[in-house]
Image (spheres, rainbow, N blue to C red):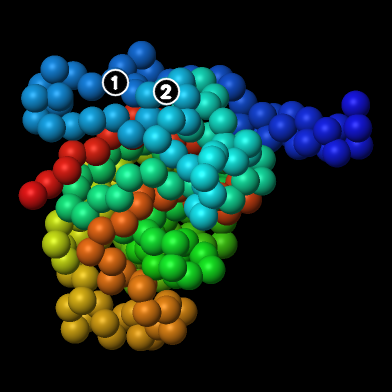
């Protein structure tokens, strides 16, 4: 085995040790749709078995560091951010995520490839272990927040290693973040309040931030192990 392969294998073993398989076993109903959901217009963005429908940001294929592990789309090694192959304008997104201890990730929406990082165009629903990551000290960057723009309340996110349920509604300029059944963020893109907050943030110099009428849904590689499952979407008029 070459030195590079040995290092890669060791990194995978260490990641699994930090995020044991017993904590990532998907429920039997994950990654599937009920008859009622199908009738209501929902469709899966992840089948629980393959990475079909996804690619790396500014790539034509999926980076190897994202793998399907126990029915979850999981960041297991350095890979970069990923996103859907299709763009979405108005939609309701539902998924579950689980983060490793001290971990950080995010869910991007209406992303584009116009800048040198996905987060310069896409608003982000923060995925975080609030208890162990420094970003958890500020509600603007804590779990559920519209990262660095709108804060989320404390006490809603579950601890590292447990599944959290997300519902994300994006319709026109209206956006809602729901975490574990609680609406934690509610805002209007382009409103005076939003413009004021963006201008006071690190996103101010980036002309595409939050201004795309449609875009990709992305998942962030922030250097930590994170898993996503039961990813489904309903396109809205």
Which one is nearer the viewer's eye here, 133 or 57?
57
Please tell me which of labels 2 and 1 falls first in the chain: 1
Mark number for residue 48?
2
Q: At 48% across and 70% down in the image, what residue appears?
A: 115
Rendered location of residue 146, percent (x, y)? 34, 63
Which one is nearer the viewer's eye here, 65 or 195?
65
| Residue labelled with disc 1 | 32
Label 1 environment density (alpha carbons within 10 Å; few <14, some 14–19, many ≥20): some
Look at the image and tell me in which quarter the N terminus lies: top right
Q: At 46% across and 20% down in the image, what residue appears?
A: 49
Displayed quadrant of residue 144 = bottom left
Which one is nearer the viewer's eye here, 58 or 119?
58
Label 2 environment density (alpha carbons within 10 Å; few <14, some 14–19, many ≥20): many
Rendered location of residue 123, percent (x, y)? 35, 63
| Whether residue 190 is visible | yes
Q: Are marks 2 and 1 in contact (CB under 8 Å)?
A: yes
Q: Name the outermost residue toward the top.
A: 28
Badge 2 element: loop
Q: Is residue 177 above or below residue 44?
A: below
Q: Give the distance between the C-alpha atoms of the residues marked 2 and 1, in whole angstroms.
A: 8 Å
Q: At 28% across and 34% down in the image, what residue appears?
A: 232
Rendered location of residue 128, percent (x, y)? 48, 51
Badge 1 element: loop
């Amino acid at each position: 085995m070459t030195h590079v392969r040995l290092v890669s294998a060791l990194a995978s073993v260490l990641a699994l040790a930090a995020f044991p398989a017993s904590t990532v076993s998907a429920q039997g109903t994950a990654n599937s749709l009920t008859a009622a959901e199908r009738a209501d217009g929902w469709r899966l963005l992840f089948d629980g078995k393959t990475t079909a429908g996804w690619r790396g940001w500014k790539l034509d294929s999926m980076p190897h560091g994202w793998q399907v592990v126990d029915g979850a789309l999981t960041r297991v090694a350095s890979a970069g951010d990923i996103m859907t192959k299709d763009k979405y304008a108005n939609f309701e997104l539902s998924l579950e995520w689980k983060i490793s201890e001290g971990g950080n990730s995010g869910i991007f929406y209406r992303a584009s490839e116009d800048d040198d990082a996905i987060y310069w165009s896409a608003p982000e629903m923060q995925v975080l272990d609030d208890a162990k990551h420094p970003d958890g000290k500020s509600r603007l960057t804590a779990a559920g927040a519209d990262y660095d723009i709108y804060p989320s309340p404390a006490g809603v996110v579950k601890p590292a290693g447990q599944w959290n349920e997300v519902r994300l509604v994006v319709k026109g300029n209206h956006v809602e973040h729901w975490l574990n059944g609680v609406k934690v963020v509610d805002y209007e893109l382009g409103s005076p309040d939003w413009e004021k907050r963006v201008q006071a943030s690190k996103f101010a110099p980036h002309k595409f931030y939050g201004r795309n009428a449609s875009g990709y849904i992305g998942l962030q590689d922030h250097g930590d192990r994170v898993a996503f499952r039961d990813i489904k979407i309903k396109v809205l008029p």
